[in-house]
Image (cartoon, helix red, strand yellow):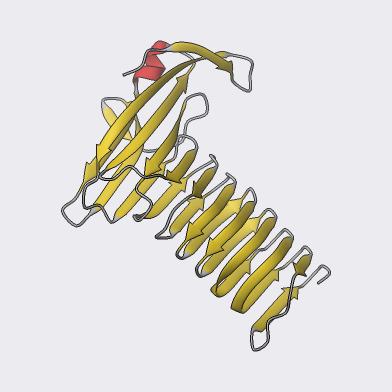
Amino acid sequence: PGAAQPGAANGTGEALLVDRREIIVPARGAEMVRIDNLLGRVGIRGTARPGEIHVVAEKRASTAEALGRLRVHYTSFESGEVQIDTRVEIGGRERSLPLASSGVDLWLEVPPDVAVEAKTFGGDVSASGLRAGAKLETTGGRIGVSDVRGGVVTHQLRGGQRLAAVEGDVDLDGVEGDMDLKNLAGGHVDARLVDGSIHADDIRASFVRLMTTTGQIVLIGVIRPGAHYDLRSYAGDV
């Protein structure tokens, strides 16, 4: 357990209290970890910690009373799924929703061979060191993926995405924000944007599709014999 400590100021200059806590989640036999944090950021790293998930939860709020209403929960199921989520107590009930003046950031170390799904609202979400793929979703945060084996799927409304050193099928979806892709290898790489540019370097896949409505597409690297390439921008250079 942690204790509330003075922290940084928020966007209005108001000082924030910070409570940092460490949680050990039993995960022997776990096959899937699902993280849902609408209150802040999520960072996931695969490490050699067999049978457990190490979570650092950093809560922040302008008052001790508001800090005390922030919650982190985990649930383990017989199916092998572990769910971790954040909530806020309002009117005697716990709810999962974003707040303007309070938040929770989650930093997790998970066994590398578990599949991971993570969702945020306005916070960044990142994953590294995983060996069973990742599915990441955010409304307004940035997405970062590095050193991952297995399929990677992303959904993003705005913010930008950066992927590097991924071995597996890649399926990226974004509305607003650039994509930076480097050193991707797998059966297919499929990246779709509405407003933003796609920069891809060293893409080794048999099917490559890069599409944007307004923005540039840049592909750097060797064109592989027999591979299929579909590069499209409706209002930008290719």
From the viewer's perspective, is residue 191 above or below residue 51? below
- Residue reaching furthest to the front: 48
Which quarter of the rendering shows the C terminus?
bottom right
Residue 103: percent from left, percent from top: 47, 28
Which quarter of the rendering shows the N terminus?
top left
**Left or right, 18 with reference to 32:** right
Residue 199: percent from left, percent from top: 73, 61
Could you tell me how many numbered marks the image carries?
A: 0
Residue 34: percent from left, percent from top: 34, 50
Tell me what residue is drawn at x 31 percent, y 55 percent: 32
- Residue reaching furthest to the right: 237
Residue 188 figure quarter: bottom right
Tell me what residue is drawn at x 23 percent, y 42 percent: 75
**Left or right, 3 with reference to 193:** left
- Residue reaching furthest to the left: 78
Residue 180: percent from left, percent from top: 68, 57
- Residue reaching furthest to the bottom: 226
From the viewer's perspective, is residue 163 above or below residue 44? below
Tell me what residue is drawn at x 21 percent, y 52 percent: 29
From the viewer's perspective, is residue 189 above or below residue 135? below
Tell me what residue is drawn at x 62 percent, y 67 percent: 191
Residue 58 figure quarter: top left
From the viewer's perspective, is residue 24 above or below residue 153? above
